């Protein structure tokens, strides 16, 4: 072993570990000197040569920069050729709406917030599409019998409730029974003489005693689950737990209701998209309805970024919205604001007085105070619902209006008020608390006062239970003039507002209007299915309505909608029968965008 070690040692290098400080210092100085000489020779002495070619260097650098830039632009161009921006999926859409929210059961929905929640969480047999026409939701077909008194409706077989249970026609018949039951006290009306009969799980028949051409529009009602409410007494359904935590079959399902401020009614309704929805899954993952008590609170919520959209604003509110951050739209809906004249009042039972007010009302001045493009409303029906040679309201003519009053014996006294037989011409004009209505009321009464009519105005708050507008104002017809919005909807059937049979304490003929020709035209129109004949009947009624002047059409209503610039909501080209129809394409709404590959 010792011999092997001796043999290896002969081949190992001999390393001297003894360092000489002076020798190292001398070597370092030689290296330093050589470095300086080389730098002087190859850099400093040749700098002049660099300066001589600096122009070529600069040109070369610029050329290289342009080449790099061109390459980058080419890459970007190629990238954009196969990529595009598309609406983002997921995200949270927070919409401000007016409350209150006392229930989430759509059978009792009255406020905008309750109606919005009902639309998003519950399905219907039919609904209105983006063109404003009826389209199928749960239904797949509707057949009418020969006598036009029975409708057989087929529904989809794949409909699921949010809890996974199957929706069948038994649920539909159950819902109709609740609507018709007076102990339930539903806000949905018009089903008294209609019955529903289940044929099988996907077939149901609706029948009535007489023909009703607009019946399919009645099928736009929310369907409730029998397996959740079948064991609840009808009179207790409103107060049941279902009204706070409902199960529906719409595109969104309830997640949580947060009470933010009990005093003001401030709430947030949190909903998530439903994977069971029969028409597909919404792009938005979560939908929030932020409920506020006043329009001022909605404006504040927009300014503080609490929401990214808002409904239920009045035209007067729009000027307070930051237009650099939000898109604003004002879309006409199938509703009209009217000055409804009480034909049974001690003054306005005289048709000449009503015609004088008609001629003395400048509706153009009222519309000028509303959003640009607010449409005129001459008739008891929205103009776009009729075709042909439509009648026109008398033009604004204050001279003619004064002459009518003079000829009727109403003479202006020393106070500038018209009187007859010792009695002053004094009208009580009532409207609801609403900045839009109140501004129209101010302009309207100013015009009538210029005719010599004394006017007393009253503004009622429908949200104030102590005022009880229905019982104290509408049922007893405690007004001469009622400035109010009438919701006409997707069909021109205005029977409920103007037929003499509806001039009752609980009816909606607030003018107590009665005319044999008008009654016949309205009754015939709702019983005929030929579009041309129905159109002719409604034109006949409109002519008689203008001649009798039970109301003055002021303007067609609009729906104001505010949305952040980074969201995609309803298309402004959509035709809205009501503000709720903005949700007709809610499945396609989105928050933000994302880059995606184009499909070939």
Image: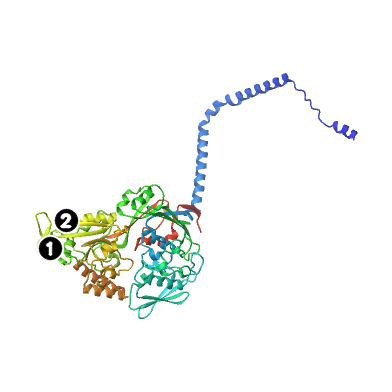
Name the residue rendered at 33%, 77% in the picture. Answer: 211
Secondary structure beneath dot 1 equals: helix
> Residue 218, position in %: x, y?
36, 70
**Which quarter of the rendered picture does the N terminus lie within?**
top right
Q: Earlier in the sequence, mark 2 or mark 1?
A: 1
Image coordinates for residue 106, horizontal then vertical, percent: 40, 64
The secondary element bearing badge 2 is classed as: helix
Indicate the quadrant where residue 336 lies.
bottom left
Mark 2 crowd level (few <14, some 14–19, many ≥20, 10 Å Cα): some
Identify the residue at the far top of this view: 22
Q: Observer-nearest residue: 361 or 290?
A: 290
Q: Distance from label 2 to label 1 (Cα)?
A: 15 Å
Q: Residue 139's quadrant in the figure?
A: bottom left
What residue do we see at 52% from left, 28% from top?
51
The nearer-to-camera label among 2 and 1 is: 2
Judging depth in this view, the residue of 457 and 410 nearest the camera is 457
Colour scheme employed for the rendering of this structure: rainbow
What percent of the width, then of the height, locates residue 347?
Answer: 16, 64
Say the numbered circle drawn on residue 404. 1
| Mark count | 2
Disc 2 designates what residue?
449
In the image, residue 438 above or below residue 523: above
Q: Looking at the picture, tell me which residue is in the foreground, 427 or 97.
A: 427
Q: Which mark, residue 110?
A: none
Specify whether 281 is left or right of 471: right
- The reply, left or right, for residue 218 in relation to residue 549 is right
Residue 508 seen in the current view? yes
Determine whether label 2 and label 1 are within 8 Å by CB. Answer: no
Residue 166, x across and y down, in percent: 50, 69
Question: In the picture provided, is 94 more to the left or to the right than 48?
Answer: left
Residue 45 visible somewhere in the drawing: no
The crowding category of the residue bearing disc 1, from other C-alpha atoms within 10 Å (few below 14, some 14 to 19, many at least 20), is some
């Amino acid at each position: 072993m010792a011999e092997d070690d001796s043999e290896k040692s002969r081949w190992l290098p001999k390393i001297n570990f003894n360092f000489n400080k002076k020798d190292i210092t001398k070597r370092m100085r030689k290296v330093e000197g050589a470095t300086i000489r080389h730098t002087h020779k190859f850099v400093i002495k040749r700098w002049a040569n660099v300066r001589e070619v600096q122009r070529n260097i600069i040109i070369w650098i610029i050329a290289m920069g342009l080449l790099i830039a061109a390459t980058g632009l080419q890459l970007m161009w190629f990238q954009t050729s196969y990529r595009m921006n598309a609406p983002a999926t997921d995200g949270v859409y927070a919409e401000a709406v007016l409350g209150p929210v006392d229930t989430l059961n759509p059978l009792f929905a009255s406020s905008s917030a309750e109606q919005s929640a009902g639309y998003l969480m519950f399905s219907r047999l039919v609904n209105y599409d983006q063109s404003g026409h009826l389209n199928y939701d749960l239904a797949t077909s509707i057949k009418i019998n020969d006598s036009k008194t029975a409708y057989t409706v087929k529904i989809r077989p794949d409909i699921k409730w949010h809890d996974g249970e199957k929706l069948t026609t038994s649920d539909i018949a159950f819902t109709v029974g609740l609507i018709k039951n007076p102990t339930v006290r539903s806000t949905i009306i018009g089903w008294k003489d209609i019955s529903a009969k289940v044929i099988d799980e996907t077939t149901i028949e609706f029948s009535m005693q007489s023909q009703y051409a607009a019946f399919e529009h009645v099928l736009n009602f929310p369907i409730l689950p029998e397996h959740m409410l079948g064991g609840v007494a009808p009179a207790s359904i409103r107060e049941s737990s279902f009204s706070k935590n409902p199960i529906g079959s719409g595109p969104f399902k309830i997640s949580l209701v947060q009470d933010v401020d009990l005093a003001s009614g401030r709430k947030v309704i949190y909903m998530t998209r439903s994977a069971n929805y029969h028409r597909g899954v919404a792009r938005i993952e979560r939908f929030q309805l932020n409920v506020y008590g006043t329009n001022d609170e909605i404006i504040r919520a927009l300014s503080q970024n609490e929401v990214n959209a808002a409904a239920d604003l009045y035209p007067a509110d729009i000027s307070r919205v930051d237009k650099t951050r939000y898109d604003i739209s004002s879309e006409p809906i199938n509703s009209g604001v009217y000055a409804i004249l009480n034909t049974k009042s001690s003054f306005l039972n005289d048709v000449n007085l009503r015609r004088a007010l008609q001629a003395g009302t400048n509706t153009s001045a009222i519309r000028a105070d509303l959003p640009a493009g607010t449409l005129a409303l001459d008739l008891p029906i929205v103009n776009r619902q009729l075709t042909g040679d439509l009648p026109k309201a008398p033009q604004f003519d204050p001279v003619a209006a004064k002459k009518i009053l003079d000829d009727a014996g109403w003479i202006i006294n020393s106070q500038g008020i018209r009187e007859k037989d010792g009695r002053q011409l004094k009208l009580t004009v009532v409207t609801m608390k609403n900045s839009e209505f109140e501004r129209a009321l101010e302009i309207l009464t100013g015009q009538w006062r210029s005719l010599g009519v004394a006017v007393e105005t009253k503004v009622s708050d429908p949200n104030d239970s102590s005022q009880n507008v229905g019982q104290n104002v509408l049922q007893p017809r405690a007004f001469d003039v009622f400035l109010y919005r009438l919701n006409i909807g997707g069909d021109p059937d205005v029977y409920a507002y103007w037929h003499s049979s509806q001039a009752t304490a609980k009816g909606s003929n607030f003018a107590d209007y009665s005319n044999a020709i008008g009654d016949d035209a309205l009754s015939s129109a709702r019983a005929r299915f030929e579009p041309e004949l129905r159109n002719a009947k409604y034109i006949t009624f409109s002519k008689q309505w203008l001649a009798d002047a039970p109301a003055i059409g002021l303007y067609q209503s609009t729906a104001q909608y505010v949305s952040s610039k980074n969201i995609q909501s309803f298309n402004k080209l959509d035709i809205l029968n009501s503000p709720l129809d903005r949700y007709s394409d809610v499945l396609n709404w989105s928050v933000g965008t994302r880059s995606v590959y184009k499909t070939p």
